[in-house]
């Protein structure tokens, strides 16, 4: 799989705590390129702050981190072509945009264009949110539907799509 990573886009998808971020980090680490970690999470509480700190320590000092909780397309446009990018994750970015009242369809189109135009290989992590029960409130259903649409759009553009379950990869595309 890593030899093919020179292609433009790999999507790593799975459930929460499935091992998708660790798998995606290994894909990027295996490349002989400078590594850029595009972080979309925001720390609103101590638990999230600790999780972000743990991830930073686990990645080590060989990564350049770019914070992009809102403007992911801009972050991708500034990536040097000799690097490799890990976006972790599209789900947090989408949640941030939804809560900001953004036009999600326009944001999705802008992100797809940025992924296509990015001059470096990109590994994007996302959550599969459609395997659970139907959410009981309108905001959660809106998010689940938007996440499904985003995942489908990115998967359609991706050279490779890998589903991670219980830490095990299954190549879908």
Image (spheres, rainbow, N blue to C red):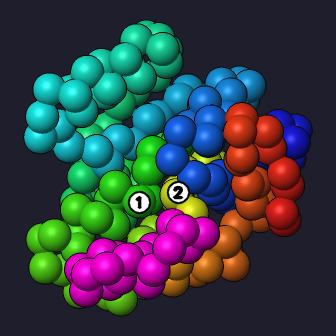
The front one of 164 and 77 is 164
Local packing at callout 2 (Cα closer than 10 Å; few below 14, some 14-19, many 20+) is many
Horizontal side of 130 relative to 27 (left or right) equals: left
Write the residue at 52% across / 57% down.
127
Q: Is residue 63 above or below residue 111?
A: above
What number is the disc on residue 168? none
Q: Position of residue 95 (x, y in %)?
A: 28, 64
Q: Quadrant of residue 27?
A: top right
Q: Quadrant of the C terminus?
A: bottom right
Residue nearer the viewer, 106 or 150: 150
Marks 1/2 in contact by CB < 8 Å: the verdict is yes
> Can you say whether 88 is above or below 111 in the image?
above
Quarter residue 161 falls in: bottom right
Tell whether position 51 is magenta. no
In the rendered image, residue 114, in percent from the top left (x then y), is placed at 46, 68
Label 1, label 2: how far apart the Cα atoms are: 5 Å
Q: Position of residue 121 (x, y in %)?
A: 64, 49
Q: In the rendering, at what x and y percent does residue 65 appear? A: 35, 30
* Quadrant occupied by the N terminus: top right
Q: On the picture, is 33 further left or further right than 99?
A: right
Sequence order check: which comes first, mark 1 or mark 2?
Answer: 1
User: Bounds of the magenta span?
Assistant: 129-147
Above or below: residue 129 compared with residue 77:
below
Q: Secondary structure at mark 2?
A: strand
Q: Residue at x 32, y 59 (%)?
A: 93
Q: Identify the residue at horizontal 80%, vertical 44% (top origin).
A: 169
Q: Which residue is mark 2?
A: 126
Label 1 Cα neighbours within 10 Å, binned few <14 / some 14-19 / many ≥20? many
Residue hosting label 1 = 91
Residue 28 visible, this orientation? no
């Amino acid at each position: 799989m890593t030899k093919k990573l020179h292609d433009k886009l790999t999507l790593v998808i799975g459930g929460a705590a499935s091992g998708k971020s660790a798998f995606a980090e290994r894909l990027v680490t295996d490349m002989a390129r400078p590594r850029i970690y595009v972080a979309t999470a925001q720390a609103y509480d101590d638990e999230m702050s600790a999780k972000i700190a743990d991830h930073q320590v686990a990645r080590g000092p060989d990564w350049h981190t770019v914070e992009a909780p809102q403007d992911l397309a801009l972050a991708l446009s500034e990536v040097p072509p000799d690097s490799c990018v890990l976006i972790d994750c599209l789900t947090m970015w989408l949640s941030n945009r939804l809560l900001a009242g953004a036009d999600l369809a326009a944001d999705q189109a802008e992100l797809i264009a940025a992924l296509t135009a990015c001059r470096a290989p990109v590994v994007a992590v996302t959550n599969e949110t459609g395997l659970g029960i139907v959410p009981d409130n309108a905001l959660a259903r809106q998010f689940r539907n938007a996440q499904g649409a985003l995942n489908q759009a990115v998967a359609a553009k991706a050279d490779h799509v890998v589903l991670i379950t219980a830490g095990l990869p299954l190549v879908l595309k």
